[in-house]
Image (spheres, coloured by chain):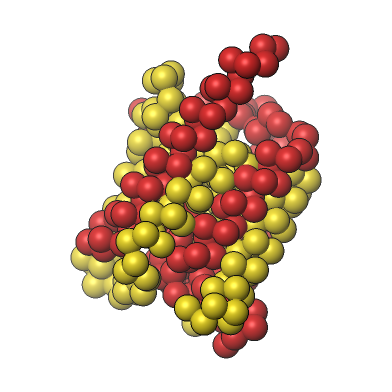
Chain colours: A red, B yellow
Amino acid sequence: MAANLVALAAGLLFSLGLTLSGMIDPARILGFLDVAGVWNPILGVVMASAVAVAAVGFALGRRLAHPLAASAFHPPGQTAIDARLVGGAALFGIGWGLVGYCPGPALASLGLGLRAAWLFALAMIAGMVLAGVVAAARRRRCPG
Amino acid sequence: MIGEAALGGALIGVAVALLWLGIGHIAGISGILARMGEGCSRGRGWRASFLVGLIAAPLLYGLAGGAVPLPTVTRDPWLLVAAGLLVGFGSRLGSGCTSGHGVCGVARLSRRSLTATATFMLAAVATVFVSRHLLGG
């Protein structure tokens, strides 16, 4: 229960941050990515600020044996820089650049009644399901 | 504008720190969403709670009298579907998106996340350059 409340608060704060900074507006994302046009530096400021505060959180975490409301930390386990990482990031970047939506702002916009956000989010979920199917098929082909 | 951006970014950072220090999980939105659909039900509760907060905050902020920016986005359904498929597929294949790699991973100085973030930034900048300046869309 405590874990759910922590996660709810984190989701609310994350999305409030996207809203206050204007990052739920894809036009501003594209304004940052359009380095050859009228450049809008806002996304850079948002990310730098978010990274700086998050880094303090991760540094504090190194002093804890376990999280405050759970028994263990769950750091990402993979370490390899491989074709899947780079290829996946490249495909993600192309999709992001096409309309200016990444997963956070797209989901945060669902309550605003935008058909575009719903269409994007449904296609995004379909893309995730497809990636899961492909990954499962690969695992079946190459055991171990 | 800059002040709001810095404040909004700081709130995102606080959310990331809260999820890590509170329950030991990375606030990567593509991963949180994708794992909701996987077979194992363990961890679904906190993930669902996070997503509820993510969707509810702009509404609550608007109801409280705050100015929610009106998103300007293409209405071309094929472009939206193509972009959504690429973002969904690419974020799973590459194990993260703007939040998981771009904020959390960069803050942890993960070499994987630094590589992924540089890659998706370059790919997105190139895509916008081609669509706006070469194709004129």
Tell me residue A45's x, y (percent). 61, 72
Tell me residue A81's x, y (percent). 77, 40
Tell me residue A117's x, y (percent). 33, 59
In the rendered view, does A44 fall on the left or right side of A110?
right
In the image, farthest residue toward the front: B135
Number of on-image labels = 0
Q: Is residue B112 visible?
A: yes
- For image coordinates 45% across by 61% down, the residue present is A101
Task: Locate the C terminus of chain A and report the quarter of the image it occupies.
Answer: top right
Q: Is residue A64 above or below residue B83?
A: above
Q: Is residue A119 above or below residue B45?
A: below
Q: Is residue A55 visible?
A: no
B33 and A130: which one is in front?
A: A130
B18 and A101: which one is in front?
A: A101
- For image coordinates 52% across by 57% down, the residue present is A95
Q: Is residue B75 above or below residue A102?
A: below
- For image coordinates 35% across by 36% down, the residue present is B48
- For image coordinates 59% across by 67% down, the residue present is B127
* Quadrant of the rendered image containing residue B134: bottom right
In the image, farthest residue toward the top: A143
Q: Is residue B116 above or below residue A25?
A: above
In the rendered view, does A30 fall on the left or right side of B52?
right
Task: Locate the N terminus of chain A and report the quarter of the image it occupies.
Answer: top left
